[in-house]
Amino acid sequence: MSLEQVVAAQPPADLEEWRRRLFMVEGTIVMSEDDWNTYWPYIDNVWSHRSTQKSKKGPFVTHYYDCRLKGRPPGTPVNQDPNKKKRKRTARERDLCEMKIKIIEATAPIRTFTIEKVKREIGVNGEEPAGEYHRHTLEESDRIKRNTVQRQALKLEKEIKRVQQKTYHKKASGLALQTVKRHSKPNDLKLFSSCFCPFAQRVWIALEVKGINYQYIEVDPYKKPANLLEINPRGLVPAIKHGDWGCYESTVLLEYLEDLGVGQPLLVQHPQVRANSRLWCDHINRHIVPTFYRYLQEQDPEKIPEHAEELRVEIDKLVNVADAVGPFFMGPYITLVDVSVAPWFLRLRRVLQPYRGWLPADVNSRLGMWIAALEASEAIKNTTSDDALYVDSYERYAENRPDTSQLANAINSGRGLP
Ligand SMILES: N[C@@H](CCC(=O)N[C@@H](CS)C(=O)NCC(=O)O)C(=O)O
């Protein structure tokens, strides 16, 4: 039986008896190859291999083992290889047990394993030689180290969990996919985007609101393809290329599209009203967006309500200065503030509700009406994928997996967002 088969199979019925035998090692134990493969991986945690000697006399080798509780012999160097995974280790008290065994492995005519204690001198006064018995129980050995079967089973479990983990999507779905298809033809204006990315969605919505023609190019910003790095050396989406010129940063790109002066404007003409819009876009970037991720990435259930409250407060500040009738920020039309906040408002229901129990706003509240209007906007619908895409794509954030993204790392280390 291979190790994989041993791990997959039910433990043998007489396992405990065999474990005790291979712990105590009374007399001589002879095992067939099959028995050895079946039982040894369940007890190898007790023993620590010291040396192997090949016999000159015949087809067998002798393996010497110390009880693991002997500790490492003095002078065993600690591995200095910086690439070797460091294990958390606590120095074990040394020489807790002096029991030693030898295993004679015969390789011909059939493979067998003969196990016995290493013979010791009887003390001068006839007392038991040191190392005749373990100075501890089998349970103590089990507490110190897991056996190979347990370690393999754990590894397998972790691997299964890893494979079952959801990850970000690399292709839009639903109405967003239809839009991607409509904008797949080469165009002078290219949007480098990722279907799950709210920053990219801002720019995508603006293009749709304005009715500007463009080519949509889906990229994986975590793989940092050359065509993205060429425009944005930081490798973040969104980025646009217009002719030979390229630029990035969602807020800068929104202003650029506005400056083109094509299609429906997102800013009104009045300088002070324009400044006000930019002021509230700044609030979205500096308060709503980071709070959203702090809340989503929080792993301590006790702190989740605090983050929910923090987000609610930051959203309320925006809602309180919005036009009283709306339904959008400044009235009946979508403007820059709507486009800047929409991707995160859409993700309240799609991401924060399933992962963090976010309570959606009352449909008749000012926020409820605003979100409903955003959801009903053609430009927004056309850039939004099916709900499952967001649930899957944000599991990494909700579990705060290591190295999820530059943004997630910035949140974890308290730095400003990228
Ligand atoms: N400040 C940037 C943020 C863009 C951003 O963080 N984009 C994410 C995708 S949602 C990204 O490209 N991540 C790649 C990475 O973390 O390496 C903007 O507003 O455009």
Image: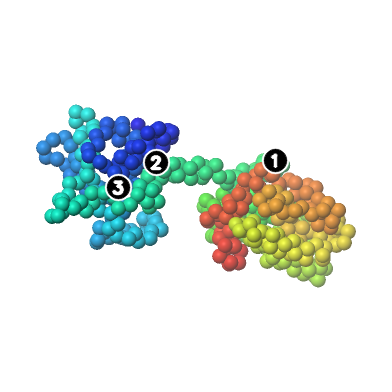
Distance from label 3 to label 1 (Cα)? Answer: 58 Å
**To which quarter of the image does residue 321 belong?**
bottom right
Question: Which is more N-terminal, label 1 or label 3?
Answer: 3
Depth check: 13 or 182 in front? 13
Give percent across and percent down for residue 167: 57, 46
Disc ID at residue 149: 2
Question: Which is more N-terminal, label 1 or label 2?
Answer: 2
Task: Pick out the residue farthest to the left.
Answer: 57
Residue at point 65%, 61% (across, down): 303
Q: Secondary structure at mark 3?
A: strand
The residue carrying mark 3 is 47
Q: Secondary structure at mark 1?
A: helix
Depth check: 248 or 366 in front? 366
Q: Secondary structure at mark 2?
A: helix
Establish whether ligand 1 lies closer than 8 Å to the Cβ of label 1. Answer: no
Disc ID at residue 174: 1
Depth check: 287 or 58 in front? 58
- Asked if residue 21 shows in the view, the reply is yes
Question: Which is more N-terminal, label 2 or label 3?
Answer: 3
Residue at point 75%, 49% (across, down): 380
